[in-house]
Amino acid sequence: MVLITEDLVRRRAEHNNCEILSLEEVSLHQQDIEKIEHIDKWCRDLKILYLQNNLIPRIENVYRLKKLEYLNLALNNIELIENLEGCESLQKLDLTVNFVGRLSSVESLKHNLHLQELFLVGNPCTEFEGYRQYVVASLPQLKYLDGKEIGRSERIRARQGLDEVRRRIRQQEQDYLRKRAGEKEEAQREGGEEQRGPKRESRSSAKAKNPGFDGRWYTDINNTIPVPEENKEIQGREEKEKTSCLSSEDQEREFWEKPCAYTPESRLEAHRHLGEKKKAKERKTVKTPKAPRTLITPHGRVMNVNEPKLDFKLTEDGDNNTIVLDLEVYRHMDTSLMDVDVQPTYARVTVKGKIFQLVLPAEVRPDSSTAKRSQITGHLVLTMPKVLKGNSRQRLEVDPSKHSGVDLANIVPRENKSGEQTTFYDNFVDDPDVPPLM
């Protein structure tokens, strides 16, 4: 049973910033609601209320909606017009395709002085003789009935002979109510049989269906030979096979082709059948969790992955010795939804939880790489400098004035104190303790 909850109303109040106290219009159609409740307490300022195509059996809990102007209850299970006296501002009431059989209940709308439009198309009461004349005469404030304008002459004719029309309407109501009581009893009886399940066969008939040893059937209880347990198991398997032969499609066809009266009970039964079918389909289509995608194999091999299915261009800039990756991400996507990770051999970009990974043709320097977003196209551009190898090594430049190493170019003859040039051999002193070099 689906109920009207605060969360449901707030989700339907997005146009009002999810505020329900000041809500003036709300649509709760096709929600399988079975009871009207809480609306008159939470939304006192409501002017338009859509409740069509639900399973509501009666009109209730709307008397506090003093500002309500339009109430749509089409395609429900309503059988009586009631509890609308408190809706002082009601101008339009739609009860199309319901089960209103008591036409006299429209007289309860006399207190709704501002009511101008009423729709009762598709209800059993519209088949009564004198239906339109009775409604027009009972509700003088109406301007439209079932979408057709009520003229002045029609209103005058409707008042003539009203007593006789009212008497015929009462008689047709009684006939309909007796018919409706029979439909309710039949629905209760069928529902009880379904709950009890198939009838059990009597002991005598069960024994009569057991075959004898010669393959013939015996109806005399005293002459019936008991069937061995093995034969019973075989018969049970055969019965199961017969029932399993009836496919789900055949069962579905049998359910919808079975003749039945259009009543609130049959409508509820169809709704439950659809609900069970939907649940069974959901159980069958349970999504199995996907295995995590392999980005790097156990052997260390990096895989190319494009989960977001984005177009890209990978180029090498020889002049600047860089690799440029142009990833065509969505133009209006927020940059906070992206994450970039550059490694020496591959680049990885996460876009809204989906991974894009590409192996690079050469080794790059992640610390010098840059990521920029185009303001025109929205593309993400990664610029990754290559690592220099071989004879192209980079050397640090040192100030020659701060050079502290041995400079072989400065080994030249120097002058002594007297101004004469000397060499290394002139200052050589022979030490007698040191043996000569051989």
Image (cartoon, grey):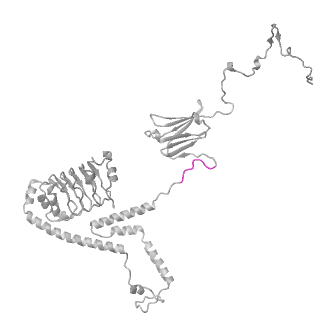
Q: In the image, what residue occupies the spot 48% across and 82% down?
A: 232
At x 49%, y 41%, the residue is 338
Q: Is residue 269 magenta?
A: no
Does residue 297 belong to the magenta stretch? Answer: yes
x, y percent for residue 129: 14, 65
**Chief secondary structure of the magenta portion:** loop
Image quadrant occupied by the N terminus: bottom left
Image vertical order of residue 46 relative to residue 197, above or below: above
The number of numbered discs placed on residues in the rendered structure image is 0
> Against 350, is 221 above or below?
below
Q: Is residue 115 above or below residue 280?
A: above
Point out the residue furthest to the bottom here: 222
| Percent of width and height locating residue 149 | 15, 53
Read off the magenta span: 291-298
Depth check: 87 or 289 in front? Answer: 87
Residue 396 as seen in the image, left or right of residue 307: right
Camera-side residue of 360 and 299: 299
